[in-house]
Image: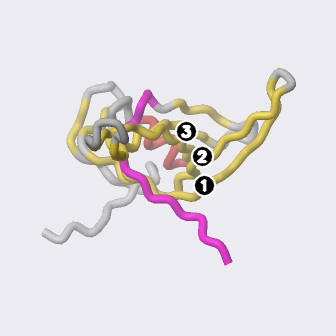
Amino acid sequence: MSINRVVISGNLTRDPELRHTQSGTSVLSISIAVNDRRKNASTGEWEDYANFIDCTLFGNRAEAMDRLLQKGSKVTIDGKLRWSQWERDGQKRSKIEVIVQDIDPCGNLKKSSGEAVEGVVIDEETGLYEEDIPF
């Protein structure tokens, strides 16, 4: 048995990029900076450094997140890792990305006009969901 599950929280490093497959499926690409800490061997001080993670969303949720997210938006993602390989200019290339199964936007989001809003309006068409709020 194997488990392929990833949970990350961080900020978008660029605006989302929405495209569509030939069959019409929406595909949203985002990149998230996730901070980590490590001890500098020469100074003994703890330092922050960023990991940059490519993530992909599909379908209605991709459309909804494209309208809401922008560079700097904070999100928490639950997903799985996918490895892909291709050849460009005669050189083999590969990458690991997170296929998003669940996304929780945190903090300020943008309206379609681009202005920031607090929170998220939830409805069936967007593919967004509302978690139970304990208060």
Residue 109 picture location, percent across and down: 29, 38
Q: Residue at x 60, y 65 (%)?
A: 4
What span is colored magenta in the figure?
1-15
Left or right, 22 with respect to 67, comes to right
Whichever of callouts 1 and 2 sits on the residue coming sooner in the sequence is 1
* Figure quadrant of the N terminus: bottom right
Q: Residue at x 54, y 44 (%)?
A: 55
Q: Which residue is mark 2?
A: 97
Q: Nearer the viewer, residue 122 or 71?
A: 71
Identify which amino acid the numbered label 2 is placed on.
Glu
Q: Which residue is mark 3?
A: 28
Q: Is residue 72 above or below residue 26?
A: above
Q: Nearer the viewer, residue 73 or 32?
A: 32
* Figure quadrant of the C terminus: bottom left
Whichever of callouts 2 and 3 sits on the residue coming sooner in the sequence is 3
Q: Is residue 71 above or below residue 55?
A: above
